Amino acid sequence: MLAGSLLIGFTVIAIAIWLEYNDSLGWPNEVEIERNRSADVDHRYRMIRRRWRRVVHVLIAVCGALMGAAGLAGLGRFWIAAWTAVAILMMAIILIALGDAIRTRRHYASKKNGRDNLRTTDLTGS
C-alpha cells in the first residue's frame, strides 16, 4: 500500500506541475487565438480564468501530497482523514471547473451578442 500511495501521490503532483507549466506557456489552440486577437478585448476574462486554473493546480498538488502522506502514515485515523480530504478537495475542484465553464459560456455569449449588435449597427448605418 505504501508504494501504491506514493506512486499515485507523485503522479498526481507531476500532473499538477505539468498542467501549470503548460498553462503558463499557453495551450497550442489558445496561443493561436491570442495571435489573431487584440490584447485588451479578453484581458480581464483571461486573468480571472488563469487565477482559478492556478488554484485548481494547487488543489490537485495538495491532493497528491495527501495521497503520498496517507501512504506513508499507513492505515489509521490519518489515512482516513487524508483520503476524506482528497475526496472533498476533488469535489471542490469539480465545483471550480463548473464555475469556469459557466464563466466561459457567459463570456463567449456576451462576445457573440456584441458582434451581433455590431453587425446590426453596420447594416443600418446608425
Image (spheres, helix red, strand yellow):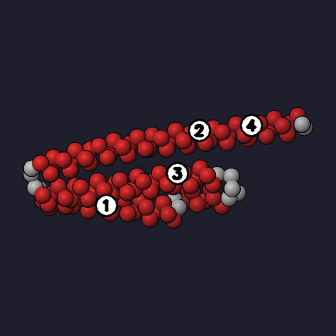
Q: Which tag, 3 or 2, sits closer to the chain's start?
A: 3
Residue carrying label 4: 116
Side (left or right) of 57 relative to 106: left
- Circle 2: residue type: Arg
Q: Nearer the viewer, residue 6 or 72?
A: 72
Whole-Å distance between the Cαs marked 4 and 2? 15 Å
Picture quadrant where residue 29 is located: bottom right
Which is nearer the N-term, disc 2 or disc 1?
1
- Return the residue found at the far left: 75
Circles 1 and 3: CB distance less than 8 Å? Answer: no
Q: Give x and y (percent) for residue 105.
A: 56, 39
Residue 65 vertical placement versus 107 (above, below): below
Tell me if residue 98 can be seen: yes
Return the disc, 4 or 2, that comes first in the chain's sequence: 2
Residue type, numbered disc 3: Arg
Marks 1/3: CA distance?
A: 21 Å
Q: Which mark is residue 13?
A: 1
Dot 1 alpha-carbon crowd within 10 angstroms: few under 14, some 14 to 19, many 20 or more: many
Residue type, label 4: Asp
The nearer-to-camera label among 4 and 3 is 3
Is residue 8 visible in the rendered image? The answer is no
Q: Which residue is mark 2?
A: 106
Viewer-side residue, 13 vs 51: 51
Q: Give the amino acid at mark 1.
A: Ile
Residue holding disc 3: 49
Residue 8 x/y as whole percent: 23, 57
**Which tag, 4 or 3, sits closer to the chain's start?**
3
Q: Residues within 10 Å of mark 4 (few under 14, many from 20)?
A: few
